[in-house]
Image (tube, rainbow, N blue to C red):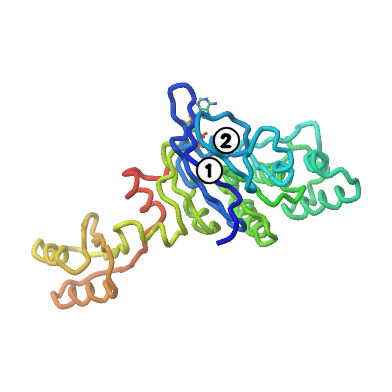
Amino acid sequence: MSESVIVVENLVKRYKELIALDHFNLDIKQGEIFGLLGPNGSGKTTAINCILALLNYDKGNVQVFGEDMKPDSYEQKSKIGVVMQNVAVFDELTVYDNIDFFCGLYIKDKKLRKQYVEEAIEFVDLADYKKFYPKKLSGGLLRRLNIACGIAHKPTLIFMDEPTVAVDPQSRNKILEGIQELNRHGATIVYTSHYMEEVEQICTRIAIIDKGKNLAMGTTDELKKMIKKNETISIELLDLPETISEQIKALPHVYDMTYTDNLLKVFYSGGKHNLIRLLDFLKQEDISFGRVYSERPTLNDVFLEITGTELRD
Ligand code: ADP
Ligand code: MG
């Protein structure tokens, strides 16, 4: 495995009585797009703020690039880019000048800075809006400006906190592709979201977070293997006699079954050829059926099985 870029051990963060992070652990490796997946209020932003030493915490250790992270760790911070959940740009500055300002905090050389700013503008596809003020930008464009400001200085570690919330699909795709491109160019990315589809689409590894705890960590496949549900087969049926329903429940690997609104759902904990076996059984019993489909578990299923609640909001 490659080197650890971020190591978080037993982090505890309280806001008065509320425990926002409860012995939280992470180990993020060089080259990952690491997803922090959890519902609103689960502690994602707090975790980022603690890692960046923007926030004091009650207990635990944070190392970034192999060294303790402190408020004055300027050397480490110069290699970090942050795209905050709440858009943070200056209303008085144009798109170009905003990016130039943030880039200028790190890059002193004028010529190099100009090049970096232009590249960032190109990267988020805002060339047509260089002279616009933030107030004139749509939500999606504003998000893209926010991203450009965070990445223009070419950091090797980038935090992106829910960069796609309230963004139109076109901008969303651009942002997701952009994250992957930054990663291809060598940046390690920490990406938070409560949209499991996005996390599944782009992240190399994912931590499932709930109530300040890191409940499970792994690749999408590893997470899905942690749960009982392995396959769900849905079949449209006009009628399901009781005897048939009992027999379906007794088929190999079936652990549960529901039948509502003419839709039969059979839940499998494993096994192969479940679909063929089920259809053969229905044919043999002379049960006619409509549409049939098989689904693999989603990250929502993983979340549901681990926490007992839905991730979807
Ligand atoms: P997420 O980013 O996953 O939505 P947050 O880290 O923002 O979660 O919040 C975690 C918990 O801490 C929530 O219950 C939230 O209400 C609480 N919280 C966050 N910031 C503060 C604060 N400054 N003061 C008090 N409580 C806070
Ligand atoms: Mg947040």
The amino acid pointed to by label 2 is Cys
Residue 16 position, x and y percent, is 47, 21
Q: Tell me the residue at 87%/43% (across/down).
A: 108
Q: Residue tagged by mark 2?
A: 50
- Residue 135: percent from left, percent from top: 73, 35
**Residue farthest toward the left in the current orientation of the protein:** 243
Q: Residue at x 22, y 66 (%)?
A: 253
On whether ligand 1 comes within 8 Å of the CB at mark 2, the answer is: no
Q: Nearer the viewer, residue 70 or 108?
A: 70
How far separated are the C-alphas under marks 1 and 2? 10 Å
Q: Are marks 1 and 2 in contact (CB under 8 Å)?
A: yes
Which image quadrant for residue 214?
Answer: top left
- Residue closest to the far right: 111
Q: Secondary structure at mark 2?
A: helix
Rate crowding at label 1 as few (under 14), some (14 to 19) or many (20 or more) other CA atoms within 10 Å.
Answer: some
Taking 152 as reference, is 273 above or below it? below
Q: Which of the numbered marks, if any, corresponds to residue 8? A: 1
Which quarter of the rendered picture does the C terminus lie within?
top left
In the image, residue 246 sits, relative to residue 77, either above or below, namely: below
Q: Foreground: 128 or 103?
A: 103
Q: Secondary structure at mark 1?
A: strand
Q: In which quadrant of the rendered image does the N terminus lie?
A: bottom right
Across and down, in percent, residue 175 comes to: 64, 52
Q: Position of residue 120 (x, y in %)?
A: 77, 51
Q: How many marks?
A: 2
- Badge 1 amino acid: Val
